[in-house]
Image: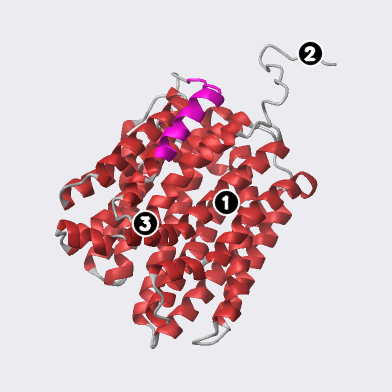
Amino acid sequence: MKPASPSEPAPEPGRRRSSAPLIAVCAGYFMVILDVTIINVAVPVVGRDLSASLTGIQWITDGYTLVLAGFLMTGGALGDRLGNRRVFCWGVVVFTLSSAACASAPTAPFLVAARLVEGLGAALIVPGSLALLQQAYPAPATRSWAFGLWGSMAGIAASAGPLLGGLLVSTVGWRWVFLINLPVGVVCLVLTLRHVTPSPRRADRALDLPAQCLAVATVALLTGALNEAGRRGWSDPLVLAGLGLALGSAGAFVVRERLARSPALTPGMMRSRALSGAAAIGLLFNFGFYGMLFTASLWFQHRRGLSALATGVALFPAVAMTMFASVLSGRLSRRTGDRPLVVSGMVLAGLGLAGWAAAGADPAYWLLVAPMMAAGFGTSFALTGSTATVMGAAPAAYAGAASAFFNTSRQIGSAAGVALGGSLLATGATYGAGLRTSMAVGAVAYLTAAALAWWCVPARTRAP
């Protein structure tokens, strides 16, 4: 047997396949994504209880998302510099304590402030989650399995949010929407400290504050403008100003990165077809999937008259497929490589949304089950391979930054899908026409991602 080199410690039997690190990381990621959607059904009740204005209600919902999207790159840079496990644990502590503050909020401004801090904690959790999984499961086969289950958490949490939120609000009250995070946060922190190996610190990685500020401004402005576009319309001056400012700050960020001695993303990473292409694929499939969830949720409630709880049940077929698809793709990747899985997943999801668009203006529910299952299965099936592609293309010293870049792209795709879906529902000749157009656009996004995957996703992802 070949002895392990000093720079490559010998593997500990059974440790790499232990599920404890996966449970710890996925618990943190599940909380983050759940809080994006669980609040939606509680906001009307919160607004009445706290006498919140319309602006206050919007900030309760969107403030969390804006801070999460804006500070992902900063969270990734801090993880690479200070150690991903340390920053991940900081994020869990901040998120859990701010959730407790949200649950005890006496006024709407207090709740908005607590939600902003909660978003900051989430931005520290997400980039480190992928980096810690890559560290805990370095073998390609087990890493794909871990990435697949991590990815399925997003679809499950996002889809379960309205269902769980409706159940909590109708039984024990809206404050439990936030209190539910406390036990999960504590378990996540204990498991991480006990079962996740401390990450190396890289003190030589300088934190370029001007670049980080420009990244925060770019993503926050873009996400905010997209959120407002769904309510105000794309020609609204505020939306146009936000998009223009986001474009300007993005240009300044690119210039700064070229001049910086320690850039957030190295020039080699930005030129990497695998990394940049997989990030674009993530943007496109989040655009399609979250656009579908948003427009379908509104359609079930406004057109079919379903309650929030019943809407969650109606969307369950899409959720149920995500876990199954992620496990299957993780098992298949060791035999087929990543490219066939990403391409076939995107084609299947695209055909699913195209089938919904072709089903008619007011189709029977049973006709929509197969399209929802196809979209949920295809998205989760492709997420494993695209995640492995991004992380495999990044140097170990930039694992947190690569994870942040990938998740920022996905967050922008989610915001764009929701914004465009809301606009199409509002401007369509009929509600059904707007929904069908939204599904058709989502199908085009999925098929574009399939073509991009054929070009940029390698057949085999290298071990880090």
Q: Quadrant for residue 1, please give it.
A: top right
Amino acid at pointer 1: Ser
Label 1 sits on residue: 152
Q: Position of residue 32 (x, y in %)?
A: 42, 46
Q: Position of residue 178 (x, y in %)?
A: 33, 47
Q: Position of residue 211 (x, y in %)?
A: 35, 37
Question: Of helix, strand and loop, which mostly describes the magenta segment?
Answer: helix
Q: Quadrant for residue 99, please give it.
A: top left
SS for callout 2: loop
Mark nearer the viewer, 1 or 2: 1
Assess disc 2: are there few (<14), some (14-19) or many (≥20) residues with their C-alpha within 10 Å of its C-alpha. few
Label 3 sits on residue: 168
Amino acid at pointer 2: Pro
Q: Nearer the viewer, residue 413 or 119?
A: 119
Residue at 33% across / 34% down in the picture? 94
The magenta segment is 183-201
